[in-house]
Amino acid sequence: MPDSSADALPHPETAPSELPSWDLGDLYPSPDSPEIARDLDRAEADARSFAALHTGKLAAYSGAALADAIGEYERIEEVLGRAMSYAQLLFSGDSNDPAIGRFYQSMNERVTAISTHLLSFSLELNRLEPPVLERKLADPDLARWRPWLRDLRVFRPHELSDELEKLLHEKEVTGRAAWSRLFDETIAAMRITVRGEDLTCSGALNLLSDRDRTVREAAAHAVGDAFGRNVRLFSLITNTLAKDKEIIDNWRHYPRPGSYRNRSNMVEDEVVDALVAAVTADYPRLAHRYYTLKAKWLGLPKLQHWDRNAPLPDDNDHAVPWPEARERVLDAYAAFSPELAEVGKRFFDRAWIDATLRPGKAGGAFAHPTVPGAHPYLLLNYHGRTRDVMTLAHELGHGVHQVLAGGQGYLMAGTPLTLAETASVFGEMLTFRALLDAETDPARRRIMLAGKVEDMLNTVVRQIAFYRFETLLHNERRSGELVAERIGELWLQVQTESLGPAFEFTPDYRVFWAYVPHFVHTPFYVYAYAFGDCLVNALYSVFQSGHPGFQAKYLDLLRAGGTRRHRELLAPFGLDASEPDFWRRGLDVIAGFIDELEVAS
């Protein structure tokens, strides 16, 4: 589930004792281990030798010689990726520890410096004229790298001179990366007092889904006050990063703020526009309609923002112990595909998951692929709610996808963000359907259905509203810096549009944009959640229709990693994301759930 919908994050002060912590020893024994120094020293020497050997010679290489060079490039990049993954995971586990923060920054700087020696290789590859490269690709050794070369050359029209590219690359550690670190450390260090109790940011946000409305309201005001006191800092971070992006986008001649992300996602601007248009047009059919129902269920004339994730009155959601959550998810995976479940089981058996709740730990949840030579790791904050079980199913889907795609190698295992959500949302859907089908109590079934609708609205409607907010903010930033009050106005505009007339918003909600990490770390990322959710809804409907060989085709889709684009991946299922009806098909699934809830009401 998207961690930018962090209103439902777990309460780190009430950690169940049986929750697992990950063992990062499969990457490195410790931050001061000689293995890290050895690997980086060797990588630096290899990167220097690589640049000296290949720079300026690629046009004259045979296909086989170029394939050998790419293979060596991949090997060095994987060494750097392993080291950086270790530093990132350590920092995610405890950003309050100054020693870990220093290690993370030092690794970032060292890896950036080493990778600078490799930068000219990709730039020179992109300077090869298409006919020249096509002749080389006739060699079978190089043909294997065609998908990576295809994706690399998407950025060919936007590349600058070698000197400028190296400057931008080296400045990253004191530019965007530094501002991102400031954001992370500020959030991690914040303590928010709710009814006399000092909580982490995640703990306070978790209370927005408390059963007691007075607790939710107190938490909402406390969060608003805390972020309000820091809003100048968050506004400075936001304005600086937006301006930084504008400068780079202008130099690279990207037509609009979201264009770089779309190219990174290997999806056309027009496809994203079609998704956004379909979802925004469906705000009334989806969110407005559902939250009107929720206001009635809660007996409220209007919902406040702290009611959005409120439990329903008859929701007796019991705590789900970790072993039970594991069983539920793996059973759902196994019912679909024993192979899928077998891969998923490794995460539990081999300490690849950190679900404990502690101060300093990153909020939300994620799956980190690390490198194919190791394995992925999952970070969760598990509180024991049914929603947390869905988060486990979601992140395990990412992890299984990353394991299966690892056979493509470091350069081609990764998927665009739009496709990276496929396995996670599909795993979540498998688990939800299994739980729903097993439920015989109509009242409990309605609660489960409502919970699923809320998760889907958070994933689709809320993320598209986030995307709209980013678009409005970045467009307006091009005319000058935005004061915090103006950013708050844009936030309220998109929230009012998306959530609808069932809501009214108190002034403190104007600063709730400030806690969303994706706006800082990965601008315009958020639509990928909606893309993935609607794609999976359409894919799942094909599965339910009894499509022949679905499981085998689905596993092939996961194993493909980044070697195929969305059109190629969806073609075996008879789907095409560029078709106008594709997004409607996915949104109809959400609308159908709301139809069922209306009938039950």
Image (cartoon, helix red, strand yellow):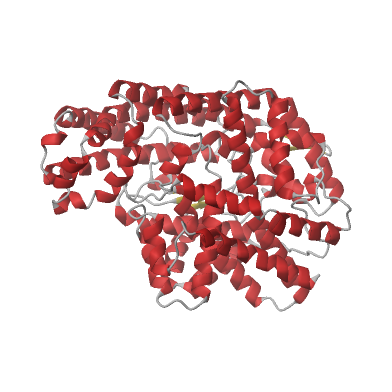
- On the image, the x and y values in percent for residue 565 come to 37, 54
At a point 18% along the width and 29% down the height, the residue shown is: 55
At a point 36% along the width and 21% down the height, the residue shown is: 167
Left or right of 133? Residue 275 is right
For the C terminus, give its image quadrant.
Answer: bottom right
- On the image, the x and y values in percent for residue 244 come to 50, 24
At a point 18% along the width and 46% down the height, the residue shown is: 134
Between residue 320 and residue 237, name the one nearer to us: 237
Between residue 497 and residue 205, name the one nearer to us: 497
- On the image, the x and y values in percent for residue 488 come to 71, 32
Within the image, what quadrant is residue 323 found in? bottom right
Between residue 193 and residue 437, name the one nearer to us: 437
Circle count: 0
- On the image, the x and y values in percent for residue 552 come to 38, 71
Above or below — where is 366 with respect to 32?
A: below
Above or below — where is 358 with respect to 169?
A: below
Within the image, what quadrant is residue 125 found in? top left
Left or right of 600? Residue 593 is left
Q: Is residue 258 visible?
A: yes
Q: Is residue 34 visible?
A: no
Q: Residue furthest front?
A: 580
Left or right of 496? Residue 114 is left
